[in-house]
Image (cartoon, rainbow, N blue to C red):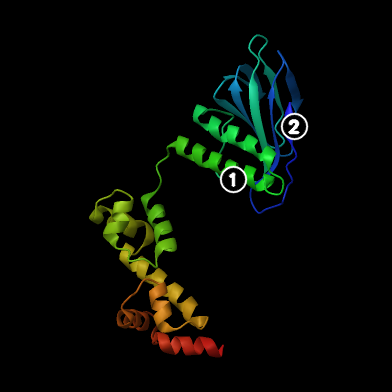
């Protein structure tokens, strides 16, 4: 058995606390036992059983079993073909619901790559953390769930409002016809996607102006290359010119 000392850095969110790998002896078992953190075991080769919540799973190479905090579990290597596995433990809340077991042979490269932490000293925790997030990304792709196109576009607007976004581009991002996309967006949000984009840009513009940034810088920062058009929309929305609003922000 090989284990690495992983220091819990107490980052916000996920924190790696344990990593190791082992080629088990025949019928080698552990438990029944509980842990205070999450623990993933990826089976590289061989076979074994995993028991959790009165269920028993038979696992083999390319499969992973999940031990949640405070769950009573037992696992045992096969008597004829004992498994070799790699494990990683972490605290925090995973970004997706987790099943008891997975068949994900493609994730082997992620677990194998984790072994490279052995050559690190100061960055060991961060390296494992990066691999964990890659694993979560892999699991999310495996779920193949259909995302809400409106939520996808809202995220697009919130982080790319400063670019020249059009409704046609929004619809194209979620592979929908423009008219249909506008319809479902308006039904969910109460306003059209174009109106939402303008409202969001103006909200950000108020923030920039109140912090003392100039009108030209603010206009460009929220996606308007035409300063006159930006000023016109801002005044229609808030009743004052952006230059006046900026001066008020400096006084407060």
Question: Is 148 drawn above or below residue 167 in the view shown?
Answer: above
Q: Quadrant of the C terminus?
A: bottom right
Q: Position of residue 188 (x, y in %)?
A: 37, 57
Residue at 40% in and 53% down: 152
Identify the image quadrant of residue 5. top right
Q: From the viewer's side, name the closer residue of 229 and 194.
A: 229
Please name the residue that numbered disc 1 is placed on. 130
Please name the residue that numbered disc 2 is placed on. 34
Q: Quadrant of the N terminus?
A: top right
Q: CA distance from mark 2 to mark 1?
A: 26 Å
Q: Which mark is residue 226?
A: none
Q: Position of residue 243 (x, y in %)?
A: 42, 88
Q: Looking at the image, can residue 54 be seen?
A: no
Residue at 49% in and 76% down: 207
Mark 2, Cα crowd under 10 Å, few <14 / some 14-19 / many 20+, is some
Residue at 26% in and 58% down: 168
Q: From the viewer's side, name the closer residue of 105 and 34.
A: 105
Q: From the viewer's side, name the closer residue of 41 and 181.
A: 41
Answer left or right for 81 relative to 171. right
Nearer to us of marks 2 and 1 is 1
Q: Position of residue 218 (x, y in %)?
A: 43, 78
* Circle 1 SS class: helix
């Amino acid at each position: 058995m090989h284990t690495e000392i992983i220091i819990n850095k107490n980052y916000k969110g996920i924190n790696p606390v344990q990593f190791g790998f082992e080629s088990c002896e025949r019928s080698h078992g552990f438990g029944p036992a509980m842990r205070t953190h999450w623990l993933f075991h990826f089976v590289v080769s061989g076979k074994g059983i995993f028991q959790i919540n009165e269920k028993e799973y038979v696992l083999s190479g390319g499969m992973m079993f999940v031990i949640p905090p405070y769950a009573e579990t037992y696992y045992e290597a096969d008597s004829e073909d004992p498994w070799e596995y790699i494990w990683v433990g972490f605290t925090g809340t995973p970004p997706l619901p987790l099943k008891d077991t997975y068949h994900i042979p493609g994730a082997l490269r992620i677990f194998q790559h984790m072994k490279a932490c052995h050559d690190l000293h100061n960055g060991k925790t961060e390296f494992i953390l990066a691999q964990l997030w890659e694993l979560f990304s892999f699991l999310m792709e495996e779920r193949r769930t259909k995302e809400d196109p409106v939520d996808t576009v809202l995220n697009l607007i919130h982080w790319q409002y400063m670019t020249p976004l059009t409704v046609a581009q929004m619809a194209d991002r979620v592979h929908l016809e423009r008219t249909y996309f506008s319809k479902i967006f308006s039904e969910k949000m109460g306003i059209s996607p174009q109106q939402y984009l303008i409202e969001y840009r103006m909200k950000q513009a108020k923030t920039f102006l109140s912090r003392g940034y100039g009108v030209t810088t603010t206009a460009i920062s929220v996606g308007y290359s035409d300063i006159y058009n930006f000023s016109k929309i801002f005044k229609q929305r808030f009743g004052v010119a952006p230059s006046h609003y900026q001066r008020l922000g400096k006084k407060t």
